[in-house]
Image (cartoon, rainbow, N blue to C red):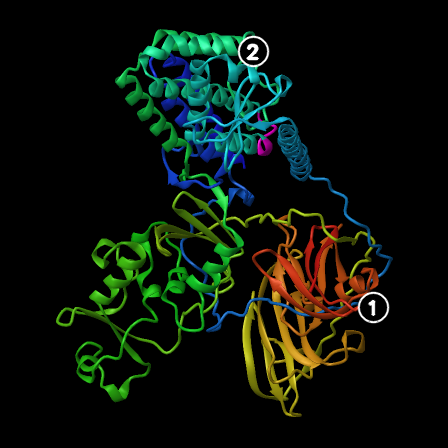
């Protein structure tokens, strides 16, 4: 509604100014017709595509539209390149898990959230006002119609196609037209017996109202007043439009009566409504001949003066109103204001434009840092591209026999490079700086050749937040693949879902604002009484001589961590010392275990170890997933930060938008307050607090809205529930819908 109010205000103001400037030279029928633009603007809540000349564009350029605050303004920082830490072929981001109810103390009470938001209050006042004004409009017209039905009697008029009724003198101040589908003319007895000329003037006047569809326009004016009852400018516009309605009717009636009837027609109006005051109720849809004193003076003056229509004035007004309409019926153009990407837009970039089940060349544009498209690292970009060269090309270009290849060979032509660069950067190979183009070039085939056995393909990237400013899109992500922190990827929107890559630079960590639902939560669960979480103590045991084969090897910040199969057949996780002593910190791992980096969790960087196992009884007792998050203590041995149990992988995310990460599983949240880690066990909290009782079902993480979608089985009241659960830093906010 904000856009409609802004544009309608400009439109009404412009029409009022033109109405006054051209008051002596413009046909009132033309001016009356222009009010239809205001009706359309007020009653049709849509705008044409955005334009630079739009009123909304001008307003938007004066507003601060950035809704995502970025720590340190999240401006890209210069970098000399990406990190060199070895990484696996597929990124496995910290995902989802299940609850760990250990170490939870205190009592948690469920209290309803009371947060009267100003927009909700104003919306309620607006709705109540509409009901009151709309009710008054309806009752006024129904009451008027019922009174007419009691007081009227049919009065046939020869040669007049519309119904004519006589009403008692108290039924109205002047003749009028009333009715929407089949409008009828209502007369006082004095008009009927006055003279044939007077009767003719009245009937032509009211018939002109009907031909102009004035009862319909009167109804639409009342609808506008009902919806925009709070806007005084809409009331002014309605009053002026009603005045112009009568002036346009006078003009139309005189066009039908003829110029010789101008003075007699004016005398009829004066004779019928001496001292007329007009209708005191603006919501009556009757088209009456009455008017206030000043309006009557204006009408009689115009009738007496005769037409002074100036074609140039009419053309000027129409052109001016066309220009004003173009500015008020179009939406605001993108002017560079910073706005947050919606959840749907983030989902598009994360699930459609990037990632996917198969190789996606767009992911490769994140394989290096570059400030301009011309500076992109071509070696990293095209590392996974190419086809198999022929045996002859292997001999002549790579200088070896096909049977002697140590690694697979690849060939990519200049044309193939140009096609990719043109599609995604708007450049050809010659237009780039050919940064790191270390492939072997063969002029005869105009192609590049290379050999390698590994891959630098980033199969997964997650963008938790993004912004749009005009056609520029910025996507922020923590680069766990390269292991070198946060980065900002800048794209240029080309339309139709196509984008050009502009830059990929390190940046400060963004502080991602959480967009909570507008409505009040069904329940809030305070977490302020939770006791600090105590992770299990990790003990290490030196193993010597039991190594058979390694399963995973990683160098975590100078600490060599390995999972290996021992001589007893068990799988251990250990820190390997320089003398090959293995300090085992975890035993009995499953075959499907995995390790990977994590960053920025409660002030620590480290690694997580994920494995299958039987969950403790308090977590269901079934086989599930255990994920341990480790950091290295001062003695260079692993210390446990948090242990997650569940059926899904846990997620590291900034749930409350304060710039600090939380750890979320499918039924628990770890967060840090007052220097210590706290744990909220979701099934335990919700089942104990939900009034009807809630049997925990399944849950699914929504990374774009930063909430947990919980599907709960039937509770004590026999209802199933679907809940969206948010974390605001101190409370759990529950938005539940029965299904």
Give the image location of residue 470, x and y in percent: 40, 43
Label 1 Cα crowd, 10 Å radius (few <14 / some 14-19 / many 20+) = few
Looking at the image, is mark 1 or mark 2 earlier in the sequence?
2
Give the residue at x 64% y 55%.
Answer: 655
Give the residue at x 87% y 58%.
Answer: 106
Judge whether residue 579 can be spotted in this image.
no
Q: Is residue 230 magenta?
A: yes
Real-space Cα distance between discs 1 and 2?
Answer: 71 Å
**Horizontal side of residue 389 vs 86, given as left or right:** left
Q: Are marks 1 and 2 in contact (CB under 8 Å)?
A: no
Which is nearer the eye, 449 or 198? Answer: 198
Which is nearer the eye, 615 or 272? Answer: 272
Q: Quadrant of the C terminus?
A: bottom right
Q: Which residue is mark 1?
A: 716
Judged from the image, the secondary structure of the residue bearing numbered disc 2 is loop
Q: Is residue 593 magenta?
A: no
Which is nearer the eye, 322 or 304? Answer: 304
Q: Quadrant of residue 642?
A: bottom right
Judge whether residue 466 can be spotted in this image.
yes
Look at the image and give the residue range highlighted in magenta: 226-231
Give the image location of residue 649, x and y in percent: 62, 70
**Horizontal side of residue 350 vs 455, given as left or right:** right
């Amino acid at each position: 509604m904000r856009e409609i109010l802004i544009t309608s205000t400009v439109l009404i103001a412009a029409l009022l100014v033109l109405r006054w400037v051209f008051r002596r030279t413009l046909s009132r029928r033309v001016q009356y017709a222009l009010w239809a633009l205001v009706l359309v603007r007020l009653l049709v809540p849509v705008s044409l595509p955005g334009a630079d000349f739009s009123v909304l564009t001008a307003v938007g350029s004066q507003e601060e539209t950035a809704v995502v605050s970025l720590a340190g303004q999240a401006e890209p920082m210069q970098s000399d390149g990406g990190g060199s830490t070895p990484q696996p072929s597929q990124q496995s981001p910290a995902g989802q898990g299940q609850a760990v109810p250990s170490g939870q103390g205190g009592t948690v009470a469920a209290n309803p959230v009371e947060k009267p938001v100003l927009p909700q209050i104003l919306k309620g006042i607006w709705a109540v006002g509409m009901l009151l004004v709309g009710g008054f409009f309806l009752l006024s017209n129904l009451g008027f119609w019922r009174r007419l039905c009691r007081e009227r009697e049919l009065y046939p008029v020869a040669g007049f196609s519309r119904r004519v009724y006589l009403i008692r003198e108290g039924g109205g101040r002047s003749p009028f037209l009333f009715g929407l589908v089949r409008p009828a003319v209502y007369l006082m007895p004095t008009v009927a017996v006055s003279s044939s000329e007077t009767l003719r003037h009245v009937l032509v006047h009211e018939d002109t109202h009907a031909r102009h569809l004035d009862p319909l326009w009167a109804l639409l004016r009342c609808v506008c007043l009902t919806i925009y009852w709070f806007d005084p400018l809409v009331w002014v516009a309605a009053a002026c439009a009603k005045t112009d309605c009568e002036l346009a009717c006078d003009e139309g009636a005189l066009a039908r009566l003829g110029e010789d009837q101008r003075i007699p027609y004016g005398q009829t109006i004066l004779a019928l409504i001496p001292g007329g005051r007009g209708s005191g109720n603006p919501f009556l849809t009757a088209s009456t001949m009455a008017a206030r004193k000043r309006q009557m003076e204006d009408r009689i003056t115009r009738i007496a003066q005769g037409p002074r229509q100036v074609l140039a004035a009419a053309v000027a007004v129409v052109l001016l109103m066309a220009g004003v309409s173009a500015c008020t019926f179009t939406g605001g153009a993108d002017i560079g204001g910073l706005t947050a990407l919606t959840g749907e837009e983030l989902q598009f970039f994360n699930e459609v434009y990037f990632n996917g089940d198969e190789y996606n060349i767009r992911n490769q544009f994140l394989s290096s840092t570059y400030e301009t498209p011309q500076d992109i690292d071509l070696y990293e970009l095209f590392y996974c591209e190419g086809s198999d060269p022929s045996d002859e090309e292997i001999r002549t270009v790579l200088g070896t026999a096909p049977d002697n290849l140590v690694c697979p060979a690849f060939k990519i032509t200049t044309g193939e490079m140009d096609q990719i660069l043109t599609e995604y950067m708007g450049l050809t190979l010659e237009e780039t700086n050919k940064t790191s183009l270390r492939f072997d070039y063969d002029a005869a085939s105009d192609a590049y050749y290379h050999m390698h056995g590994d891959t630098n393909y980033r199969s997964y990237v997650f963008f938790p937040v993004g912004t749009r400013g005009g056609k520029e899109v910025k996507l922020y992500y923590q680069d766990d693949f390269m292991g070198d922190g946060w980065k900002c990827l800048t794209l240029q929107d080309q339309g139709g879902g196509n984008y050009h890559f502009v830059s990929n630079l390190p940046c400060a960590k963004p502080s991602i604002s959480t967009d909570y639902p507008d409505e009040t939560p069904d329940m809030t669960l305070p977490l302020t009484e939770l006791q600090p979480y105590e992770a299990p103590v990790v003990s290490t045991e030196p193993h010597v001589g039991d190594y058979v084969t390694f399963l995973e090897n990683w160098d975590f910040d100078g600490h060599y961590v390995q999972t290996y199969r021992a001589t007893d057949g068990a799988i251990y996780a250990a820190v390997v010392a320089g003398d090959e002593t293995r300090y085992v910190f975890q035993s009995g791992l499953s075959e499907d275990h995995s390790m990977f980096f994590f960053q920025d969790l409660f002030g620590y960087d480290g690694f997580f170890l994920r494995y299958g196992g039987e969950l403790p009884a308090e977590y269901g007792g079934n086989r599930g997933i255990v994920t341990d998050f480790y950091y290295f203590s001062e003695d260079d041995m692993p210390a446990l930060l948090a242990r997650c149990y569940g059926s899904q992988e846990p997620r590291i995310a900034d749930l409350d938008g304060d710039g600090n990460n939380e750890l979320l599983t499918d039924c628990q949240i770890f967060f840090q307050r007052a220097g210590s880690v706290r744990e909220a066990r979701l099934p335990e909290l919700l089942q104990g607090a939900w009034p009807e009782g809630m049997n925990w079902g399944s849950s699914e993480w929504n990374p774009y809205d930063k909430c947990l979608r919980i599907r709960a089985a039937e509770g004590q009241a026999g209802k199933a529930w679907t809940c969206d659960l948010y974390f605001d830093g101190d409370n759990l906010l529950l938005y539940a819908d029965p299904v």
